[in-house]
Image (tube, rainbow, N blue to C red):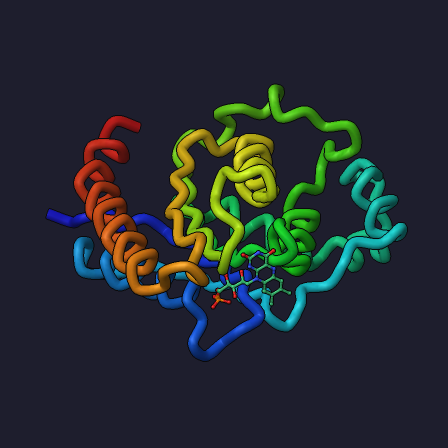
Amino acid sequence: MTVMAPKILRIDGSTRHSNSVSRGLTDLAIATLQDQFGVAHVTQRDTRSGIGNISSAWRNASLTPNEARSSEDRAVLAQSEALMNEVAAAELLLIAVPIYNFNIPAALKSWIDLICRDNVDGGRADNLVGQSKNKQALIILTSNYTMAHADDDFATPYLKFMMKFIGIDSVTFIDATGLGNDQAGVLARARDAVKTHCMKIAETWDKQTAAE
Ligand SMILES: Cc1cc2nc3c(=O)[nH]c(=O)nc-3n(C[C@H](O)[C@H](O)[C@H](O)COP(=O)(O)O)c2cc1C
């Protein structure tokens, strides 16, 4: 029997490469999924060196209907086209988000700007709910002192909204916030939560894909 493994798009938001706590947790998620499925299909999009920003030319090209776009428009949109294709191909978005200044890292915000392209001016999440039925997101949130869901956590509500906006209903957050208070305890609980959730993905994946 062939076991279908989810296609994973891994996005790391930390500017740190070595000793990155959030990367350690995404590594663990990939390792657990690989263990469960025997294979892992991973595309990695690392934002640590920045990813570029949208511009006026980009916006104009984006709002120009596809058939009317010039070759310059297409060149301006090429990167976002590639990033959007990565999202479209993925079945699991695995996103590591260290909280920076009470929100997500700027490069991760740029990635979101680049993938939310068409119909974005005045777009409403309500119109898009459930569009990506076969996709799910696993978001790993880390911080030193800003606690998930506290008044100063703008990352969680923003990401919840944006996942809905891009059409993903099934979103799980792993809470590794408050590392500055109790790094060992927070990490131990987060590692358990990552493993449990990835094992649950493996348990339900076959049934879910068979039902489609
Ligand atoms: C620019 C910057 C801003 C930060 N802002 C916050 C913050 O607002 N609240 C907080 O608790 N930690 C803050 N931190 C700490 C990071 O959230 C923490 O180092 C990170 O979650 C650890 O994950 P990493 O090791 O994968 O980078 C900030 C770190 C940086 C570099």
Q: In the figure, 160 relative to 190: above or below?
A: above
Task: Identify the residue at the far left of this view.
Answer: 1
Q: Position of residue 103 (x, y in %)?
A: 62, 49
Image quadrant in which you'd find residue 68: top right
Q: In the figure, 41 relative to 119: above or below?
A: below
Q: How many numbered circles does the render carry?
A: 0
Q: Position of residue 21 (x, y in %)?
A: 41, 67
Residue in front for this viewpoint, 31 or 186: 186
Q: Quadrant of ligand 1?
A: bottom right
Residue occupying the point 82% across, 38% down: 63
Task: Identify the residue at the far front of this view.
Answer: 181
* Quarter of the image with the C terminus in it: top left
Residue occupying the point 57% across, 43% down: 153
Residue occupying the point 51% across, 27% down: 131
- In the picture, measured across the screen, residue 33 lies left or right of residue 156, that is left
Task: Identify the residue at the far top of this view.
Answer: 126
- In the picture, measured across the screen, residue 90 lies left or right of residue 69, that is left
Q: Position of residue 130 (x, y in %)?
A: 48, 25
Residue occupying the point 34% across, 56% down: 186
Residue in front for this viewpoint, 67 or 165: 165
Task: Identify the residue at the far bottom of this view.
Answer: 18
